[in-house]
Amino acid sequence: MKFIFNNENYLEKMHMNLIDQIKSINNEIININENEYIIINNKNYIIPKLPEAFTNKDIMDTFIQGIKRS
């Protein structure tokens, strides 16, 4: 079985999809110091950002090449 990984934005799109799902089930979202939080039972939970390592093209190219060789 051959793994095809030719969309360099795959992880970013997957991350945004998960964030959109979190936002769609929770109406209470606030911004504090450039971070987004959801409020559940009066407690703030940060909505994580995608790590820079996954938005850096050079690092992603290395990651994709590693996946292709595995």
Image (cartoon, rainbow, N blue to C red):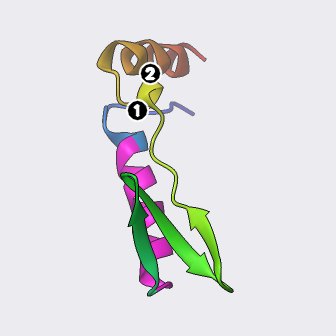
- 46 or 69: which is nearer to us? 46
* Location of residue 40 in the rendering, given as x and y in whole percent from the top left corner: 63, 81
**Which residue is depicted at the point 34% across and 12% down?**
58
Q: From the image, which quarter does the C terminus lie in?
A: top right
- Determine whether the residue tagged by mark 2 lies in a helix, strand or loop: helix
User: Of residues 6 and 44, which is closer to you in this image?
Assistant: 44
Chief secondary structure of the magenta span? Answer: helix
Disc number lying in front (2 or 1): 2
Q: Quadrant of residue 59?
A: top left
Magenta span covers which residues? Answer: 12-26
Q: Which residue is mark 1?
A: 5
Circle 2 residue: 64
- The crowd level at tag 1 (other Cα within 10 Å; few <14, some 14-19, many 20+) is few
Secondary structure of the residue carrying numbered label 1: loop
Q: Earlier in the sequence, mark 2 or mark 1?
A: 1
Q: Does the magenta run of residues contain 20?
A: yes
Q: Are marks 2 and 1 in contact (CB under 8 Å)?
A: yes
Residue 60: image location, x then y, percent: 40, 21
Depth order, front residue of 65/54: 54
